[in-house]
Amino acid sequence: MAWFAGLWTMKNRHPILLLLALCVLLSPQGAGAQHGPACAKWCPPNSVCVSGTACRCKLGFSPPDKLITSPTGTCDDIDECAAPLKVSCGKFADCENTEGSYYCTCSPGYELESGGKNFSNESENTCRDVNECISGQNPCHRSAHCINKPGGHRCQCRRGWRPIPGSPDGPDSTECEDVDECSSGQHQCHNSTVCSNTLGSYKCRCRPGWEPAPGSPNGPKSTVCREIPLPTWTRPAGVHSQSLSHFLDKVQNLSRDFKPVKAQNIIQGVLQAVDEFLETPGDVKTLPGSQQHCVATHLLLDLEGVLRVLSQAMPEGSATFNYSAGSELSLDVQEQREGHVTLSQNKAEMQLSWDLAQEPGNRGPSVVGLMSLPGMGRLLAEAPLVLEPEQEMANEINKGSLQVASLVLLSDVISAFLSNTDTWNLSSPVTFTFSHLQVTTSPRHQVLCVFWDHDQSGCGHWATTGCRTMGTKDTSTTCSCSHLSSFAVLMAHYPTQEEDLALTVITYVGLSLSLLCLLLAALTFLLCKAIQNTSTSLHLHLSICLFLAHLLFLTAIDRTEPKVLCAITAGALHYLYLASFTWMLLEGLHLFLTARNLTVVNYSSRSRVQGKVLLPVGYGVPAVIVAISVASRPHLYMTTSRCWLHTEKGFVWAFLGPICTIFSVNFVLFMMTLLIVKRKITSISSDVSNLQNTRMLTFKATAQLFILGCTWCLGVLQVGPAAQIMAYLFTIINILQGIFIFLVYCLLSQQVWEQYRKWIKGNRKSRGESESYTLSGKSMSDTSKCSTVSSFSVPSN
């Protein structure tokens, strides 16, 4: 310690000398360095040199206070974490020793609130429990349930599950499997129910042919069931028939004391009785047609209800029943399933989704049934047909009359039912394919997919609501329906053109005369320079569009082959008639503006409607409508008998909608124009008013109704008993449209007559001059002069 004493003495003498001495001691070559000339070179690792003959262990190594004076001495690490603990890390923490030091960490299952990894002493301890079971960190197998506990977790099988043999309940490696309470006898289902195992649990459902007792839903463990009573067969009110009474007594006896185990035998007995009754209905065939329809309605409804209950008591699987008169029943009874089910019979096939068959809240078997009843057609002869409103109007446009000459039942009557009774508005459609006699398409014949719709009186009629015809081949028809009932395929025979010869003659003669007048009017508007203005431009384009539309209608409307050309014809007709109505709308607007801005009506006056706007509107608007229609449903530009818009999905409204709008607007504009003209005529002087012919004005005003297309509303009125009369009126009045255009704008126009006189006069003059050049000699020359003079003396009419 002599150097320390000398240093202390130096401190008392001079501070600068003390500072220099400290620098020497702390430098690598100073007195404290292991390799300095005054230090021992043999100091062990983890020690520092004290003097040339001694070393001392660093902090955290032992021996901590004793000097090492021998080269064989060592400095060993002190384990601060060994018992007895020299340090304290606090609660939920562990001490981790390091060489020469230590640090603290949270115990497994705990973490620092700060998110750090370690700390130095107990005062820094903020360890808290980690929930290993939170989402995304679940360490347990997916079949086990993670349970958190302080500092850890436990994997436990869920209720209704058990550890797989060899996989104890608790460790992270625990795997579980479902406990089948039904097969193991651990369920508590009532003896009136059937145990149905589910993952982790079970359900109690009613046995086949049973239903939940009142207040006991089908499914929970407390379910109690009772036998389902079969529906009672009912007699139509006001119908008296011995054979019907005998049949009802027979089937009612079969249903008495129903037991689910007898379901199959009862089905066979009931269908056999129905088959025999339809084959020989006895005095039922002598009843009025309306009463026969009531008998058929009750029979279909009661049979469907009885078969639905009996089918639910059948064992799982498929079954088919056939009988001598052609009646056939196909059943498919299955537990919960996905996908589609198809039931096929001799003359019918049905396809639907299994989801439709399952009754909400019922986990039992699902039932799908299809029944064919060929004999039912005898009771449904001459039954009425009710079309959807849109289909009625569409048929009017396509067929020319709503009067159906006759209905022919092409297929067997089939009835479809499910275990689910809510089948009126299905979430997905049901597809039916019927086989029937060969069908040859012809004008005014239509194949319809129909269903039997019963009314409140207990009777019914054929209807098309919710059903549409997907396609018809020679001997089959495919239908798609959004509900279930009894179905069939009908052939509707509409009056053909030959059956109404007078209307056909009127159509062809009238349209031919209209075509001639439209052609003459178009030539007049095009060649007569003196009258060309906005009005004549409107008349010209209207005449051209109507001429082309009528011409195409007469020559190609019934030419359905080839189909591509027929579709093109339908599209062209759609465009030309829409263009005609668009020009009618422009005519009506121009007439209104003319009346509003002028003192009297003047057809040659300038309209405020600019000419450059007319062409884009007149031809562009209908082009847009047709383009949208073609892009959306190009396959509907043809019917089975006409090259026109199909009625499916209301497609015909792509034509009806615009024209109904246009003739309604034109009618309003026409009435407003009449009021304006009336006020202006009464306001002018009597001298001016006398210049107008009252009868002529009245005639021209009435003619405007035809020219503006307002009379096309008669086409919408062809319904009910007056349909035939309205058809004649519609045909006669609308073929006059072209005649009125030529009559009003050409023959009754003074300017046009003057131009006609000039043309006639010019033709006579040129003919006379031509004759003079053909003669020779002086006498011929004199004759030529007379002819020439004569030609100039023709008075102007």
Image (cartoon, helix red, strand yellow):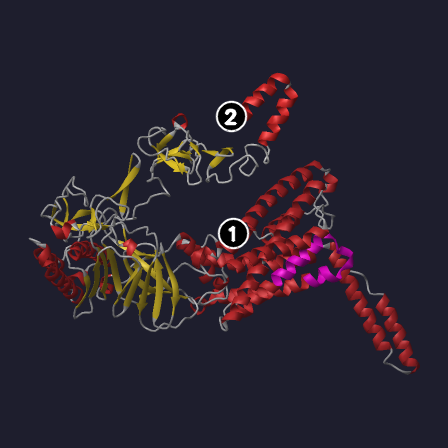
Q: Magenta-highlighted stretch: main secondary structure? A: helix
- Point 89% across, 82% down: residue: 776
Q: Is residue 580 left or right of residue 502?
A: right
Front residue of 588/223: it is: 223
* Residue on which disc 2 sits: 1
Q: Say which label, 2 or 1, has the lower sequence index.
A: 2
Q: Residue furthest top?
A: 12
| Residue 778 vs residue 371, the one in the foreground | 371
Q: Nearer the viewer, mark 2 or mark 1?
A: 2
Nearer to us in this view, 347 or 3: 3
Q: Amino acid at mark 1?
A: Gly
Residue at 54% across, 24% down: 4
Give x and y (percent) for residue 147: 27, 39
The magenta segment is 522-547
Determine whether the residue tagged by mark 1 lies in a helix, strand or loop: helix
518 left or right of 262 in image: right
Name the side, left or right, on which 654 lies relative to 307: right
**Quadrant of the rendered structure where residue 489 is?**
bottom left
